[in-house]
Image (cartoon, helix red, strand yellow):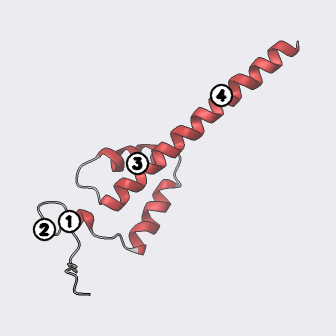
Amino acid sequence: MNQNYENNPVFPDNGQYSPNSAPMSVKSWVGTTLLLMIPLVNIILLFVWAFGEGVNLNKQNYAKASLIIIGCVAAIYIVLFVVIIGLVVNAN
């Protein structure tokens, strides 16, 4: 059972350690969550974190996933709104 596993994770930048790929601390996640509780600022920050340069990869992936979920929920709300308005208009 002699297997050659490397103990070092592979990071971007040709195997070099990158501070942007380091795990975020609990303190950073608490700060991120508090910032995302502020209306309108949260949407702006999600776009900055998702597509900005020099952002931690954990935060960048979280922001991209959040934007995808927000887009899906918004699409569902729009469809439901159109269906409900259509039913109300046709009921009269």
Q: Position of residue 2 (x, y in %)?
A: 22, 86
User: Residue 71 location in percent, x, y?
Assistant: 52, 38
* Disc nearer the start of the sequence (2/1): 1
In primary-sequence order, the first of circles 2 and 4 is 2
Disc 1 crowd rating (10 Å Cα; few below 14, some 14-19, many 20+) is some
Tag in front: 3 or 1: 1
Mark 2–mark 4 distance (CA, rounded to whole Å): 47 Å
In which quadrant of the rendered image does the C terminus lie? Answer: top right
- Label 3 and label 1: CA atoms lie apart by 20 Å
Q: What residue is shown with label 1?
A: 11
Q: Quadrant of the N terminus?
A: bottom left
Give the quarter of the image for residue 83.
top right
Residue at the spot x=35%, y=69% of the render?
A: 24
Residue tagged by mark 3? 64
Q: Residues within 10 Å of mark 3 (few under 14, many from 20)?
A: some
Expressed as whole percent of the image width and height from the top left, the position of residue 23 reads 33, 70
Q: CA distance from mark 4 to mark 1?
A: 42 Å
Of the pair 22 and 45, the residue shown nearer to us = 22
